[in-house]
Amino acid sequence: MAEAVEYQFKIPDIDGKTKGLTGRIVVGQGIEIFIDGYGCKEVEPNTGSIVYLEMYNGAPAIDVWNNIRSDAPVKVPLDLASEELREPLPEEE
């Protein structure tokens, strides 16, 4: 198994009203996104990822911890976003 790779990021606030977002992305068995100042309930402050992309039951899925007071993430399956399911575009006349 390959070792996890970590990337730091800074995303500016497009309105310029805040300092924007800083954090890190860890790529390992899945992809974890950590945002400074945000976290999840069951871990120490500033140590939990709030977004996790993984393969789940043969399709990609995203877990999102959008409420620090809740133990459970929201799981978003992405199986219906497969390009194989795309309907053909109507032909131009």
Image (cartoon, rainbow, N blue to C red):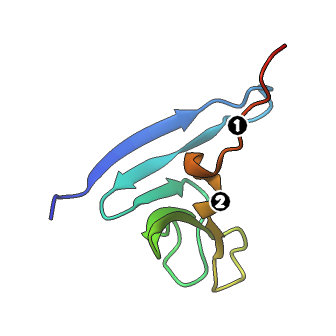
Q: For residue 54, which numbered disc appears in the image?
A: none
Classify 10 Å Cα crowding around label 2: few (below 14), some (14-19), many (20 and above): few
What residue do we see at 37% from left, 54% from top? 26
Task: Estimate the x, y position of residue 32 in percent, counting from the top left.
Answer: 45, 59
Q: For residue 88, which numbered disc appears in the image?
A: 1
Under circle 2, the secondary element is: helix
Distance from Cα at disc 2 to Cα at disc 1: 15 Å
Lateral position of residue 22 relative to residue 15, left or right = left
Image quadrant occupied by the C terminus: top right
Task: Estimate the x, y position of residue 28 in percent, counting from the top left.
Answer: 30, 60
Task: Estimate the x, y position of residue 14 in percent, counting from the top left.
Answer: 74, 26
Lateral position of residue 21 relative to residue 27, left or right = right
Q: Is residue 44 visible?
A: yes
Q: Quadrant of residue 20?
A: top right
Mark 2 = which residue? 80
Lateral position of residue 55 relative to residue 42, left or right = left
| Residue 28 or residue 11, whichever sits in front | 28
- Considering every residue shown, the one lying at the far top of the view is 93
| Residue 50 or residue 61, whichever sits in front | 61
Q: Is residue 20 above or below residue 63?
A: above
| Residue 16 or residue 30, whichever sits in front | 30
- Considering every residue shown, the one lying at the far right of the view is 93
Task: Estimate the x, y position of residue 67 in percent, counting from the top left.
Answer: 73, 73
Q: Does label 2 or label 1 sit earlier along the sequence?
A: 2
Three-letter code for the amino acid on which mark 2 is drawn: Leu
What residue do we see at 63% from left, 86% from top? 71
- Considering every residue shown, the one lying at the far left of the view is 1
Callout 2–callout 1 Cβ contact below 8 Å: no
What residue do we see at 61% from left, 81% from top? 41
Image quadrant occupied by the N terminus: bottom left
Three-letter code for the amino acid on which mark 1 is drawn: Pro
Q: Is residue 92 above or below residue 66?
A: above
